[in-house]
Structures are given as structure tokens and as C-alpha cells.
Amino acid sequence: MNGLRILIVDDEPAIARALRPALQAHDFQVAVATTGAEGLAEVARFRPHLILLDLGLPDIDGVTLVGELRQQTSTPIIIVSVRGADRDKIAALDRGADDYLTKPFSVGELLARIRVALRHQQQTPATTAASPVLTNGALVLDPARHQVTLRGAPVHLSPTEFHLLEILMAHAGKVITHGTLLHKVWGAEYAGETQLLRVYIGQLRGKIEERPQRPTYIQTEPGIGYRFREPEET
């Protein structure tokens, strides 16, 4: 990870004082912005590989800022906030954030989340060039092009959503447990984060299902996990 750049957007000086040396000790370059406007400017100047973003900024709500950032960059965004309610997490993830940490948190947990987000970002078409195109009804996932289409129209997915969908489609007809999906997509550190998985499944359904409340593709196996329907079933 030597030389990778992380931008902290947080108006609490204590957060920057604590995180900057901890991240630099792991060979990250670190920049700090204390407002949303500064954050947007630093994204253009500093060109970070990852953004740590607080929701309670003085000039703009963090959820709104996530949406603005997503208009100019696909850089992974990890929310770090005292807001722990599910509605805040879901709102941020819906806007395009990659992960969410509730303050206070340990540096070890933050570093684990950073590793996962960077791993997803670094999954380029070259790493999946040998993978076959996956087709299920009107839904097509092309790993080599990192592209998903539905009835011929492109479906815009985050790197995490793409990885999750690829695993589900590659195992169509089989039940995949919550634990297996969490481990494969996010890593062993996320073993108990079933709510995070539910949020991402909901986002996928919203993008690929005609009626997300009555899904055709992604079936829930209560208390166990999820099953992607076999092609002949759709």
C-alpha cells in the first residue's frame, strides 16, 4: 500500500490528529479537509485513493456530499460518523459510499475496512479477463469489461455491488450463506455484518429487479442467505 493517498474530510481536529499519524505509520499519504467544499477541492488536487468522510460537516450534509463526490470520482468512500442509525447508514450507502464506521472505532478496524475498500477498487478487468460472461435471462454480467446490462441497457454498479452480483450469478441455483457472502465480498473481518449485506442486496434488487419487493433474481433464504435463480427459472 506504499504511497497510496487517503483524504480525511472531518471538521473535528482530534480525528485528524489521531488518524493522520496512524495512517502514515502504515505508509499512507494523508490530506485533511474540514469542510465539504475543501473536500471537493482536495479530491481534484490530491487525487486520493480513498476518502474518509464525516457526515456532520459545517457547510454541507455528508450524505449530500457523497452524491456530489460520486459525480466526479469512483474513489472508495468510507463514512466515519457518530450517527449510528440504520437510516443514516442506508442513506449514505445509497448515495454511493462503500462502507460505514460508527465513531468511536479502533484504528485496527479502520485499517481492515480500508484494505477491503482498496481491494475492491483494485479489481480491474485484467484480473477477471479469463472469467466467462454470465447470462441470466435479460441480465448479463461481463467480468472482463466490468460491465452489467439489463435488457441491453447498462446497469451502473459500485465495485462492491459488482463483486457481490458476480458471486451470486456464478453460483445461480445454490444457496450462499450470509457468512460466505460477507467473507468473499468484504473479508473475514465482516463475519457478523448481516445488516450491511442486507443493505447491498436491497441496492442490487433496486437496480436489477423489475419489482424489488417481489424479486425475480435474488431470492432470500430466511435465516440462511441468498440464492440467485437459475437461468431457466427467470
Image: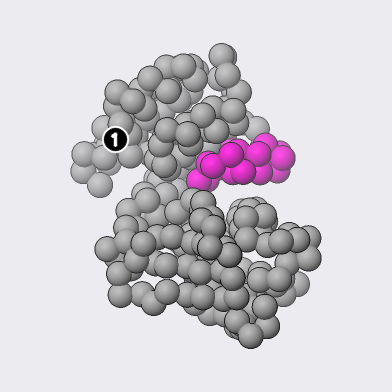
Residue at horizontal 53%, vertical 63%?
Answer: 152
Can you give x and y, in whole percent of width and height, for residue 207 in the image? 62, 55
Residue 50 in the image, given as x and y percentages of width and height: 38, 39
Q: Nearer the viewer, residue 85 or 228?
A: 228
- Whether the magenta-drawn stretch holds residue 97 is answered as yes
Q: Residues within 10 Å of mark 1 (few under 14, many from 20)?
A: some
Quadrant position of residue 5: top left
Looking at the image, is 100 positioned above or below residue 66?
Answer: below
What residue did someone put label 1 on?
5
The residue at 34%/58% (across/down) is 123
In the rendered view, does 99 fall on the left or right side of 73?
right
Residue at x-position 65% and y-position 39% = 91
The residue positioned 38% from the left and 20% from the top of the image is: 41
Vertical order, 15 against 193 (above or below): above
Q: Looking at the image, how many numbered discs can be counted on the residues?
A: 1
Magenta span: 85-104
Residue lying farthest to the front in this orientation: 152
Q: Is residue 79 shown above or below 10?
A: below
Task: List x then y, in percent, for residue 13.
Answer: 45, 17
Q: Is residue 91 left or right of residue 165?
A: right
Residue 227: in magenta span? no
Quadrant of residue 139 within the rendered picture: bottom right
Q: Nearer the viewer, residue 139 or 196?
A: 139
User: Is residue 66 toward the left or the right of residue 228 in the image?
Assistant: left
Q: Quadrant of residue 49?
A: top left
Identify residue type, mark 1.
Arg
